[in-house]
């Protein structure tokens, strides 16, 4: 079952105009890229059900420099959604992907990110695979791995046990 995504154009006054509704992450990315080629305004793709932003294009320079951009790979939709909400409330720009394959689709168009967060709720092999992929494709961006007890991602720049924001939020604010 494919998720449904809404594609928005953000006008200079901050208002949004829905430009398309598509099924599937790949189609959302293609539709977003095509819209971004036709306009200089910021463009966003969001999950139609959760309203979580999954991709952005044409982010204004001033905004891009003042807001730290975080890309999270979550493996539990509820936890990923709550983490993104908390980070947005704290002033971060957050893009989320649910699983490695979705992350790779969204990250195939190189964008600027200040930090990657890798969630805890996947097999260790999957998490190691995405950390290696991120290091190869975004070598200058730091990676925070949120881990179950007694597990660490040795290739990640930071590790924290996933048992509440008090364990990992100080890393985000200092990174």
Image (spheres, helix red, strand yellow):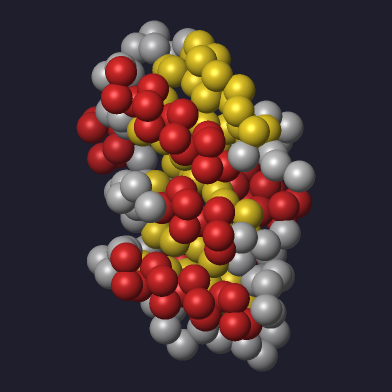
Is residue 34 rendered to the left or right of residue 153? left
Is residue 47 rendered to the left or right of residue 10? right
How many tags in the picture? Answer: 0
> Above or below — where is 103 with respect to 136?
above
Residue that appears at 31% across and 50% down: 110
Quarter that holds the C terminus? bottom left
Residue that appears at 61% across and 60% down: 99
Quarter that holds the N terminus? top right
Whether residue 115 is visible, yes or no, is yes
Q: Quadrant of residue 157?
A: bottom left
- Residue 96, horizontal then vertical, whole percent: 55, 49
> Above or below — where is 62 with respect to 167?
above
Q: Quadrant of residue 4?
A: top right
> Above or below — where is 3 with respect to 135?
above
- Residue 86, horizontal then vertical, whole percent: 61, 46
In-front residue for pair 39/65: 39
- Residue 5, horizontal then vertical, whole percent: 61, 31
Residue that appears at 47% across and 52% down: 105
Residue that appears at 31% across and 64% down: 138
Q: Residue lying farthest bottom? A: 150
Q: Quadrant of residue 89?
A: top right
Whether residue 89 is visible, yes or no, is no
In-front residue for pair 77/70: 77
- Residue 94, horizontal then vertical, whole percent: 49, 45
> Above or below — where is 10 with respect to 143?
above
In-front residue for pair 165/154: 154
């Amino acid at each position: 079952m494919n998720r449904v995504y809404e594609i928005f154009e953000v006008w200079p006054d901050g208002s949004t105009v829905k430009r398309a509704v598509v099924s599937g992450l790949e189609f959302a990315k293609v539709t977003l890229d095509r819209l971004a080629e036709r306009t200089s305004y910021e463009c966003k793709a969001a999950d139609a059900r959760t309203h979580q932003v999954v991709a952005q294009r044409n982010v204004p320079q001033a905004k891009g420099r003042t807001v730290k951009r975080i890309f999270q790979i979550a493996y539990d939709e509820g936890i990923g959604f709550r983490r993104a909400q908390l980070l947005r409330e704290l002033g971060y720009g957050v893009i989320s992907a649910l699983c490695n394959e979705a992350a790779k689709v969204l990250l195939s168009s190189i964008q600027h990110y200040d930090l990657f967060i890798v969630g805890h709720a996947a097999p260790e092999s999957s998490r190691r695979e995405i950390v290696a992929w991120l290091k190869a494709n975004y070598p200058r961006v730091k990676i925070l791995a949120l881990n179950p007890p007694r597990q660490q991602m040795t290739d990640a720049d930071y590790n924290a046990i996933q048992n509440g924001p008090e364990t990992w939020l100080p890393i985000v604010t200092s990174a």
